[in-house]
Image: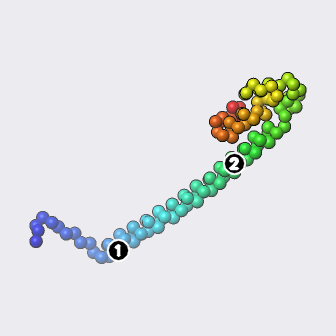
């Protein structure tokens, strides 16, 4: 026999206990993973719903003419965003397109 090599043996009951603890840990880990996956799906669904509501609000808020809201005739109108002379910034299709694409952001006060 080789000297210097020690073989460690554990009692069978201790090995079984360790195996059971490892199995319990794997089950708990799998349950936690399933819980996190479900939470992520739920959050994704809520963010999608919020995004759709925000898009609908932006489209709906631009549906009425800004000229009429401000009491001005459409012939004296100028967009501060694109410079167009037939609408205000609130009705600017270019501005709305950039907001929808994410290139422009609206702050909590509703400003670009």
Residue 104: percent from left, percent from top = 66, 35
Image position of 1 (left or right of 49) = left
Q: Secondary structure at mark 1?
A: helix
Q: Which residue is mark 1?
A: 16
Q: Which of 35 and 80 lies nearest the eye of the viewer?
A: 80
Q: Quadrant of residue 58?
A: top right
Does residue 14 lie above or below 62 as drawn?
Answer: below
Residue 72 appears anywhere in the view: no
Q: Which residue is mark 2?
A: 50
Which residue: 10% across, 67% down? 3
Cα distance in 3D space between marks 1 and 2: 51 Å
Residue 87: percent from left, percent from top = 81, 29
Which residue: 73% across, 47% down? 53
Instruction: For the N terminus, give its image quadrant.
Output: bottom left
Residue 63: percent from left, percent from top = 82, 39
Q: Which of 97 and 55 lies nearest the eye of the viewer?
A: 97
Q: Are marks 1 and 2 in contact (CB under 8 Å)?
A: no
Instruction: For the C terminus, give its image quadrant.
Output: top right
Q: Nearer the viewer, mark 1 or mark 2?
A: 2
Q: Secondary structure at mark 2?
A: helix
- Categorize mark 1 by other alpha carbons within 10 Å: few (<14), some (14-19), many (20+): few
Residue 109: percent from left, percent from top = 71, 33
Q: Quadrant of residue 107?
A: top right
């Amino acid at each position: 026999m080789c000297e210097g090599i020690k073989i460690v043996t554990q009692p069978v009951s201790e090995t079984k206990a360790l195996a059971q603890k490892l199995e319990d840990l794997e089950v708990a880990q799998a349950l936690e993973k399933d819980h996190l996956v479900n939470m992520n799906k739920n959050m994704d669904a809520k963010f999608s719903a919020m995004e759709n509501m925000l898009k609908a609000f932006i489209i709906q808020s631009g549906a009425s003419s800004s000229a009429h809201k401000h009491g001005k005739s459409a012939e004296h109108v100028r967009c501060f965003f694109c410079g167009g002379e037939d609408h205000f910034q609130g009705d600017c299709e270019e501005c709305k397109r950039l907001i929808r694409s994410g290139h422009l952001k609206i702050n909590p006060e509703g400003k670009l």
